[in-house]
């Protein structure tokens, strides 16, 4: 049970994020749904309240646009001002294989939202998480990280852009971030772990083109082969709530079990360099 625990879930208005939020509320946790689209988020929150019987205090919506560092800072200022404790941060929101676009701050969209936005969010909420210890950070990555690499000469994809590769790189960055974050958090009472949810039926793939005539067949097949959002959320909920992972640090899980990662996802030298460059990119001065 998560009674008395406050949890932030980014991208909680649909898919895995919404299912994660609902599951945590069912465990008596209090959820802050951090979402870009306020209208859709309020609709999702109302769905969760009706499903669980929770009130508007237990399921809250706050505006957060991870494609805007200004929005990230504003969100964190409000959270720090309004929330005495934060027990779990679930970095769930993601952009998947979108056409080449840039964030408000000029970053390639997938790297900017999936990695840099969450990097700054986690940094700004860290003191609150430490004050709330024992607390947890949960990072949603993807098995597609295997197809990515970190090119420090072109993190912004200005020399070359492939939407699938860019997504994989952002998911690899999530794992390297978790690796370095866990190292820095040793002994703090805050744990950081990642997960890969598997192939889930969500609207994340809205930028992936499927011919109109093939869509009915695709939808039929996906129902048989892909996980439901609720199934996809199980590992996020496990890492947020289970006593089994008390004190576990810097691991990646799939189907609620630790998984082996490729060496490139745990390379300490690359993780440390990516951390330093990310600090510069988001304007953190230490």
Image (cartoon, helix red, strand yellow):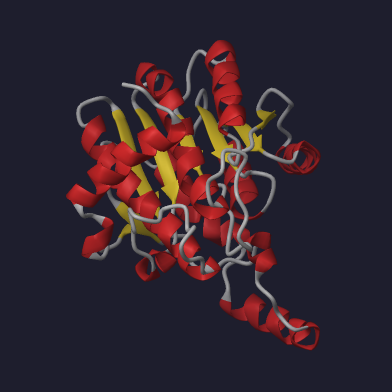
Q: Position of residue 46 (x, y in %)?
A: 79, 38
Q: In this view, does 170 lie to the left or right of 70?
A: left
Residue lying at 74% horizontally and 35% vertically, measured from the top left: 53
Q: In which quarter of the image is the C terminus?
A: top left
Residue farthest front in this picture: 159
Q: In this view, does 190 lie above or below 43?
A: above
Q: Where is residue 280 in the image (x, y as percent from the top left)?
A: 37, 34
111 and 171: which is toward the camera: 111
Q: Position of residue 233 (x, y in %)?
A: 53, 54
Res 47 → quadrant: top right
Residue 256 seen in the figure: no
Residue lying at 48% horizontally and 62% vertically, measured from the top left: 166
Q: In this view, does 230 lie to the left or right of 206?
A: left
69 and 142: which is toward the camera: 69
Res 11 → quadrant: top right
Residue lying at 35% horizontally and 56% vertically, measured from the top left: 253
Residue 253 seen in the figure: yes
Res 45 → quadrant: top right
Q: Where is residue 176 in the image (x, y as percent from the top left)?
A: 31, 50
161 and 183: which is toward the camera: 161
């Amino acid at each position: 049970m998560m009674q008395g625990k406050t949890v932030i879930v980014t991208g909680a208005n649909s898919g895995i994020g919404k299912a994660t939020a609902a599951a945590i509320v069912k465990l008596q946790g209090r959820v802050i749904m951090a979402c870009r689209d306020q209208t859709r988020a309020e609709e999702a929150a109302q769905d969760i309240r009706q499903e669980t019987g929770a009130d508007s205090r237990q399921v809250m919506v706050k505006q957060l646009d991870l494609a805007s560092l200004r929005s990230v800072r504003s969100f964190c200022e409000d959270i720090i001002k309004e929330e005495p404790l934060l027990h779990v941060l679930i970095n769930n929101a993601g952009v998947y294989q979108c056409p080449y676009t840039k964030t408000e701050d000029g970053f390639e969209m997938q790297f900017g939202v999936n990695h840099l936005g969450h990097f700054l969010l986690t940094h700004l909420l860290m003191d609150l998480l430490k004050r709330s210890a024992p607390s947890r950070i949960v990072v949603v990555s993807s098995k597609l990280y295997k197809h990515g690499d970190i090119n420090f000469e072109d993190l912004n994809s200005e020399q070359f852009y492939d939407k699938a590769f860019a997504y994989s790189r952002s998911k690899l960055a999530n794992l390297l971030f978790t690796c370095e974050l866990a190292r820095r958090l040793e002994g703090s009472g805050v744990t950081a772990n990642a997960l890969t949810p598997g192939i889930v039926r969500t609207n994340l793939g809205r930028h992936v083109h499927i011919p109109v005539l093939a869509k009915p067949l695709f939808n039929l097949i996906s129902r048989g082969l892909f996980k439901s959002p609720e199934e996809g959320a199980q590992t996020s909920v496990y890492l947020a709530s289970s006593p089994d992972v008390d004190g576990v640090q810097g691991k990646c899980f799939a189907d609620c079990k630790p998984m082996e990662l490729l060496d490139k996802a745990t390379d300490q030298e690359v993780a440390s360099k990516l951390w330093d460059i990310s600090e510069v990119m988001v304007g953190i001065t230490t």
